[in-house]
Image (spheres, rainbow, N blue to C red):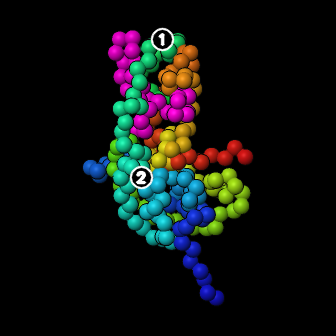
Amino acid sequence: MLQITMRVAKETVVAIEYTLKDDQGNIIDASGERGPMEYLHGAQNIIPGLEQGVEGLVAGDTKNVLVPPQLGYGEYSEKLLQQVPLTAFGANTPQVGMRFHAETNLGMRVLTIKKIEGEEVTLDGNHELAGKTLHFDIKVVSVRAAELTELSHGHPHQSGGCCGGGGCGSGESSEGGCCSTGESSEGGCCSSEEGAAAGGCCSTEQPVAQKQGGCGSAGCGCSA
C-alpha cells in the first residue's frame, strides 16, 4: 500500500524538538524534558521566521533555522521604555528584573522593570529577545492534519510542550523563547492608558528563567 508522507503546511499540527541559541552559541531555551513543542502551522502559534523555516519538512527532518529580529521578536525599541512613579506599585516592593502584565495603549503586554532610580521606575515593554538573531536547531517529530476543532480554536489540543512563551518564537508568552507574541504570565495586571503600572495593582512576580513568548505568537492554551 502506498503511504503518503505528510509535509508541514497550513492546517497541519506539527511537533518539533528544538534548541535555541544566540549569536555566541549560548543556549537560550530547548524543548528538552518538556518534550516536543506542538503547534498549528499557519495559525501564528510561533514566530514567523521559525514557521517559514519548518514549511515543507516531514517527520524525521532536521534543520538549522536562522531567524532575524524582524521575523522573530522585532527590533528593540526605545519607544517601549517608560518611566512611572514608585508609588504606582502601592505596597509592593519593585525590583529590577520583575515582570508583570499591564494594559497599555498597545494592548496587554508583559513589562519588565529595567531600572529604579530614586522615586522613578523604568519599565521595558520590549520582549527580552527583541533585537536578537535567533538560531534554532530543530527536528520534526510528527506532522498530522489538524482537527476541525483545532482549526476553529487556532491551536492544537494535544498535550505536550507549548512553546514558551515555550522557547522558540514571536510574542510574549512567559515560557520559552520561540512562541508567538501572545502574552501569558501569572502576575497581576496593572491598567493604565499610558501603558504604565497604575493603582498599585502590580504583581511582584520574580524574574523567570523561561523566555516570554517562548515560541512565537500566542495560542498556547485552550479555555474551551
Q: Residue 4: x, y in percent?
A: 59, 80
Q: Determine the CA span between mark 1 and mark 2.
A: 37 Å
What residue is pinned by disc 2? 71
Q: Nearer the viewer, mark 1 or mark 2?
A: 2
Q: Which residues are magenta?
A: 102-128
Q: Quadrant of residue 3?
A: bottom right
Secondary structure at badge 1 equals helix
Q: Is residue 14 left or right of residue 145?
A: left
Residue ID for mark 1: 87
What secondary structure predominates along the stretch shown in magenta? strand
Q: Residue at x 42, y 49 (%)?
A: 72
Image label count: 2
In percent of width and height, residue 76 lies at 36, 39
Q: Quadrant of residue 83?
A: top left
Q: Amino acid at mark 1?
A: Thr
How busy is the neighbourhood of tag 2: few (under 14 within 10 Å), some, or many (20 plus)?
many
Is 56 a magenta residue?
no
Q: Earlier in the sequence, mark 1 or mark 2?
A: 2
